[in-house]
Image (cartoon, rainbow, N blue to C red):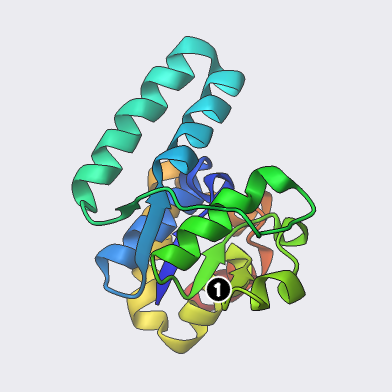
Amino acid sequence: MRLFLDACVLYPLLTRRIAAGLAEAGLIEPRWSGRVLAEWIAAAAREGGIAGEVSAAAERDELEARFPGARVPEADDEGIHLPDPADAHVVAAAVASGCDAILTFNIRDFPARRLAAHGIAARHPDDLFWELYSGRPREVGPVISAAVDAVAPGEGRRLLKRAHLPRLGKAWAADAA
């Protein structure tokens, strides 16, 4: 499954680690654009100042080294009409790069009816990660465990819930118990 990762998925460490782990396991093919990466870095700078910006830039470089084919060119977003016009570039790049879906926490910004006209859908990380976990727990479980342990060991379900991944957290914690 080829997924275009929105900046709101790349910015939080936990969702970025889960997505990267799923990609390394061959369960998804991540895609992003330079503009999405710039939005991630800008968000990190807003939250963490210069240290946040420097850290995010280093993480971006490491992520791009791990997935050299993930960056796609910017695409013409003319004719794409969304509630927030600033999101049209995400749809344009996702469609132009042949993605199956846009992975975003901002589902309301990507109405299904408007995306259907472009042959793409938006997926919430909790729904997609839970779906992958439910279908392949032996493959996805270690990805979730590694991501949780790297961010906040021992926090498990609570960390996933705070990261807006409650359904995944509930399923993963039940299986871990």
Badge 1 marks a residue whose secondary structure is helix
Q: Residue at x 26, y 64 (%)?
A: 24
Q: Residue at x 57, y 74 (%)?
A: 120
- Farthest residue in the top direction? 50
Q: Which residue is mark 1?
A: 128
- Farthest residue in the bottom direction? 135
Quarter in which the N terminus is drawn: bottom left
What amino acid does circle 1 point to?
A: Leu
Q: Residue at x 29, y 44 (%)?
A: 63
Taking 161 as reference, is 20 left or right? left
The answer to whether one can see residue 161 in this image is yes
Taking 119 as reference, is 53 left or right? left
- Tell me residue 91's x, y (percent): 57, 59
Q: Could you say which quadrant of the image residue 26 lies in?
A: bottom left
- Tell me residue 65's x, y (percent): 19, 44
As drawn, 23 above or below 34: below
- Tell me residue 59's x, y (percent): 33, 34
As drawn, 4 above or below 130: above
As drawn, 111 above or below 5: below
The answer to whether one can see residue 152 in this image is no
